[in-house]
C-alpha cells in the first residue's frame, strides 16, 4: 500500500489532480476543499467546519474503505478520518482550530484518546498528516508543542518514522516540512507519520512548482 499525506494549501482541482498522478492507494489531505472531485478510480471522505478547507481522505476503491464504526460521534471530532485495508488502520489527522478555543495539543490528545481503543484491533496502525505541532525554543505558540503528543504515542507503542530513520530526536530535526507564508526564514516541522510497525519506505515530496504548498508531502509504503 502506498499512502501520501500532503497539506496542499489553498486547494484547487489542479492540485488534487497532481496528487492523484502520484498513483497512491490512500491520500490524507489537510486543507482539502469539499468541492473538488477525484476521478472515477477513487472515493473521498471530507470533514471540516467550512467547505473550502477541511481534512480529506481519498482512496482507491479496491483498496479498503472507511470502517463501519466511523459513525456520527467520531465525525463530531473534526479533522480525523480513519481508513482500513486488510489488517491496517490509517488515521489521517489535522488538529485545527476553526471556531475552537482549544489548543492544537488538546485537539490532538482528543483525537488519540477517541481512536485509542481501535489501535489494538489492527496489526499495523499509521497516524499521519499535518499535526500542527512542533518544538522550538522561544516559539510563538507554546500550546502547539509536539513533546506531549510524542510521549503519549510512544506509550501506545508508536514511533515517528522520520525520526527513527533519520536517527534524530523529535523536536530537533535537521530539516523542516513547513515554511510559514512560503518564507524560508520561518521553518517548522509539522508533518509526521507515526506507526506501530516498521514500514518499507518513507520519504518526502518536494513541491512540483513554486508556491504549490507551504508544506512538504510525505509518502509511506507498507
Image: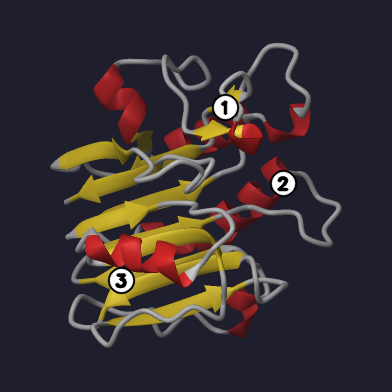
Residue 174 coordinates in the image, percent (x, y)? 42, 14
Q: Quadrant of residue 54?
A: bottom right
Q: Distance between the residues labelled 2 and 3?
A: 25 Å
Tell me if residue 218 comes above or below residue 151 in the rendering. below
Q: Nearer the viewer, residue 147 or 104?
A: 104
Furthest toward the front, the residue is 210
Going from N to C along the chain, the mark reached first, 3 or 1, is 3
Tell me if residue 212 comes above or below residue 42 in the rendering. above
Q: How crowded is mark 3: few (under 14 residues within 10 Å), some or many (20 or more)?
A: some
Query: At numbered mark 3, what does the secondary structure look like: helix, strand or loop?
Result: strand
Q: Is residue 121 visible?
A: no
Q: How far apart are marks 2 and 1 (CA)?
A: 19 Å
The residue that disc 3 covers is 84
The residue lying at 77 percent from left, 60 percent from top is 98
Query: Relative to 188, is 82 on the left or the right?
Result: left
Which quadrant of the rendered structure holds the N terminus?
A: bottom left
Q: Nearer the viewer, mark 2 or mark 1?
A: 1
Query: At numbered mark 2, what does the secondary structure look like: helix, strand or loop?
Result: helix
The residue that disc 2 covers is 106
The residue lying at 32 percent from left, 54 percent from top is 4
Q: Can residue 196 be seen in this view?
A: yes
Going from N to C along the chain, the mark reached first, 2 or 3, is 3
Residue 127 coordinates in the image, percent (x, y)? 41, 51
Going from N to C along the chain, the mark reached first, 2 or 1, is 2
Residue 55 coordinates in the image, percent (x, y)? 55, 65
The residue that disc 1 covers is 188
Amino acid at each position: 500500500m502506498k499512502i501520501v499525506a500532503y497539506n496542499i494549501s489553498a486547494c484547487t482541482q489542479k492540485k488534487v489532480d497532481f496528487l492523484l498522478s502520484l498513483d497512491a492507494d490512500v491520500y490524507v489531505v489537510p486543507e482539502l476543499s469539499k468541492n473538488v472531485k477525484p476521478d472515477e478510480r477513487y472515493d473521498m471522505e471530507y470533514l471540516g467546519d467550512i467547505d473550502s478547507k477541511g481534512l480529506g481522505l481519498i482512496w482507491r476503491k479496491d483498496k479498503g474503505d472507511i470502517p463501519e464504526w466511523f459513525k456520527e460521534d467520531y465525525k463530531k471530532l473534526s479533522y480525523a478520518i480513519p481508513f482500513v485495508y486488510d489488517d491496517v488502520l490509517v488515521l489521517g489527522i489535522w488538529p485545527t482550530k476553526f471556531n475552537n478555543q482549544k489548543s492544537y495539543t488538546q485537539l490532538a490528545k482528543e483525537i488519540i484518546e477517541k481512536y485509542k481503543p481501535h489501535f489494538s484491533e489492527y496489526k499495523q496502525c499509521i497516524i499521519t498528516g499535518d499535526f500542527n505541532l512542533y518544538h522550538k525554543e522561544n516559539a510563538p505558540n507554546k500550546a502547539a508543542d509536539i513533546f506531549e503528543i510524542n510521549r503519549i504515542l510512544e506509550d501506545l507503542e508508536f514511533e515517528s518514522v522520520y525520526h527513527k530513520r533519520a536517527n534524530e530526536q523529535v523536536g530537533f530535526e535537521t530539516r523542516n516540512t513547513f515554511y510559514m507564508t512560503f518564507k524560508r526564514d520561518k521553518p517548522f516541522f509539522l508533518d509526521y507519520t507515526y506507526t506501530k510497525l516498521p514500514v518499507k519506505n518513507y520519504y518526502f515530496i518536494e513541491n512540483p512548482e513554486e508556491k504549490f504548498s507551504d508544506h512538504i508531502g510525505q509518502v509511506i509504503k507498507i
